[in-house]
Amino acid sequence: MSELHQLLRCPQCGTAPEPGLALCKGCGRSIATVGGCLDLLDDQGREAADRFATQYTALRRQEGWIGLESKEDPEGGEPRLWRGRVESVSRAATTLSSQWTGGGRPIVVDIGSGGGWAARYFPDADVIAIDLLDTKNSPGNLNVRADMRSLPLRDSTVDVAFYAASLHYAPVSDSIRQAARVLRAGGLLIAVDSPMYSDHRRQAQAEARSAAYYAQAGFPELAAHYHPIEVAALREALREGGFDVLRLEAGRTGRRWWQRLGRRERSFLIARLNHGYS
Ligand SMILES: C[S@@+](CC[C@H](N)C(=O)[O-])C[C@H]1O[C@@H](n2cnc3c(N)ncnc32)[C@H](O)[C@@H]1O
C-alpha cells in the first residue's frame, strides 16, 4: 500500500483505501468516483457535493476559470484570471522550501484543490489533493473527493495543510480545527488568496456582496459555501488550534484607497503548529 493511502480513512469504517481498489477493503463501500479519484465522502456528503459541484463548475466555466479541459487549472482557463493565483501558489511553494526543516519529502495536503494543479509547484513534496469536485488523478499526486470540514486523514499525519483561495469555503474555525488535527507537531498551515477583512462589519458587507453576485449569476445556493474571513476570528482560531502565526497579510480588501495603500493585493498566511493535536 502506498504511504499516502495509509494516511486516509474510509468515512464508514476507518480502513485505509487500497490503491487501485474501487471498494473499501474493510466495509465494501464504493470509494471511487466516476472520474476515477478516491471518494471518501459519506452518503449525505456525496449528495451535497454533487449538487455543489454541478453549480460551482457551471459558474466557474461562465466566469472563464474553466476551459475545455473541464477542470479548474491555469492551463485551461483564461490566463488573465489565473495570473495572480499562480503567483501566489509559487510564493507559497518558495516559502515552504525556506520554512520546511523536517528533511525528506514533506506530505502536503492541498485542501480545496480544484483541479489539483498546485501539485506541479511542489515537486519536492508528496501531495494529496482534496476537493468536493471529482477530479482525475494526475501523475504524481493523489486526488481525493472529501470535505475540508471533515478531512478523511488520520490525526497528526501530514506536514503541510495548504489552501489556495479555499480557506474561506468553510467557517474558519472548522477549517483550522481540522488542519490542527491532521498536522504533525511543527507542521505548517499555508493559506493564500482568501478574502480577509479587518472587522465584522466589512466581513458582513463582503458576504452580502457575494450573495448578491451568486444570485444574479443564477446560483444563489453557492453563497452558503462562501465565508469571507474576519482577521480577528482567524487569529483566534489559530491560537485555539495551537498555531504560532509566522506571517499574516490580510491583503488589500479595504474599500477605501488609503486602506489599500502599500498592501499586497492578496492575502497570505503561514502558521506553524506548536504542539501535537490532543
Ligand atoms: C476558488 S477554488 C480554488 C481551487 C484551487 N485551490 C485553485 O487555486 O485553483 C475553491 C475550491 O474549494 C473547493 N471547496 C469548496 N468547499 C469545499 C469543501 N467543503 N471541502 C473541500 N473543498 C471545497 C471548491 O470545489 C473549489 O475547487
Image (cartoon, rainbow, N blue to C red):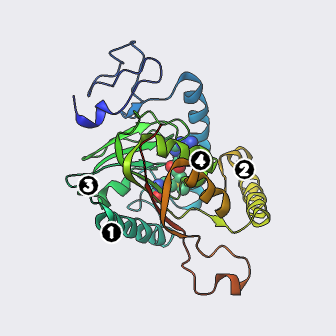
Helix, strand or loop at label 4? It is helix
Q: Identify which residue is drawn at 65% across, 46% down.
A: 225
Task: Note whether 122 is above or below 254 in the view shown.
Answer: above
* Disc 2 residue: CB within 8 Å of ligand 1: no
Residue 88 seen from this side: yes
Q: Which residue is mark 4?
A: 56
How many other residues sit within 10 Å of disc 3, few (<14), some (14-19) or many (≥20)?
Answer: few
How far apart marks 3 and 2 lie (CA) works out to 47 Å
Name the front one of labels 3 and 1. Answer: 3
Which of the two residues, 231 or 127, is positioned nearer the viewer here? 231
- Mark 1: few/some/many CA within 10 Å (<14, 14-19, 20+): few
Residue placed under numbered mark 2 in the picture? 218
Q: Looking at the image, is mark 3 or mark 2 earlier in the sequence?
A: 3
Q: Amino acid at mark 3?
A: Gly
> For the residues marked 3 and 1, what is the alpha-carbon distance in whole angstroms?
15 Å
* Above or below, comparing residue 246 to residue 174 in the picture: below
Which-is-in-front pick, marks 3 and 2?
A: 3
The residue pinned by badge 1 equals 94
